[in-house]
Image (cartoon, rainbow, N blue to C red):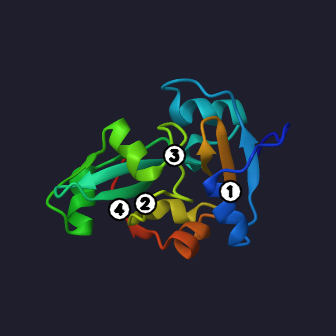
Amino acid sequence: MAKKDKHVSETPATQMLKAAGVAYTEHLYEYVDHGGTAESAKQLGVDEHSVIKTLVMQDEKAQPLIVLMHGDRSVSTKNLAREIGAKGVEPCKPEVAQRHSGYLVGGTSPFGLKKAMPVYVEASVLALPRICINGGRRGYLVGISPQVLVDLLGATPVHCALA
């Protein structure tokens, strides 16, 4: 999948993965503001569909939640709200997302979050053989089995992807 040129210092995400005995690979790339998953996929030579973004959202009561989505897809907040029994769901503002997760936007990992939040994953992500997901720092992805999302995070599968 990619390069492991230099050692990356631990993050809360990698600490959680190590503590749980999860095997992962490290993938470094040059972080580009607003480059998103298209940029990381291009630099790492992987399919953007298997690069999973971690989105911090909130329901109508301002309760935070995490949505894990294919890099080349968007979240239908309407479908997500319907599936999780909320009246509405919207993305958190960057400073609010950072406060909830403990991570800088662009470096948000679903592992090692500052605050426990429900985690939802687009169901089709779980069918992939392997995924790359943020390792807790901008320019740093970890390669894992998607089953880890369910086993370690208790992620609930949902159907809310928009092409």
CA–CA distance in space, label 2 to label 4 = 25 Å
**Mark 2 or mark 4, which has the lower sequence index?**
2
Cα separation, mark 1 vs mark 3, equals 12 Å
Which amino acid, mark 4? His
Residue 142 position within the rendered picture, expressed as x and y whole percent measured from the top left: 68, 51
How busy is the neighbourhood of tag 3: few (under 14 within 10 Å), some, or many (20 plus)?
Answer: many
Query: Cα distance, mark 1 to mark 2?
Result: 16 Å
Q: Which mark is residue 159?
A: 4
Q: Nearer the viewer, mark 3 or mark 2?
A: 2
- Which amino acid type is marked by label 2? Lys
The tag earlier along the polypeptide, 3 or 4, is: 3
Q: Position of residue 151 (x, y in %)?
A: 57, 75
Locate residue 63: give its quadrant. bottom left
Tell me the amino acid under the disc marked 1. Thr
Q: Residue at x 52, y 72 (%)?
A: 150
Q: Residues within 10 Å of mark 1 (few under 14, many from 20)?
A: many
| 2 versus 68 height, above or below | above
The residue under label 3 is which amino acid type?
Thr
Which of the numbered marks, if any, corresponds to residue 115?
Answer: 2
Residue that carries the numbered disc 3 in the rendered image: 108
Residue 115: x and y in percent read: 43, 60
Return the x and y of residue 82 as percentages of the image width and height.
20, 63
Q: Does label 3 or label 2 sit earlier along the sequence?
A: 3
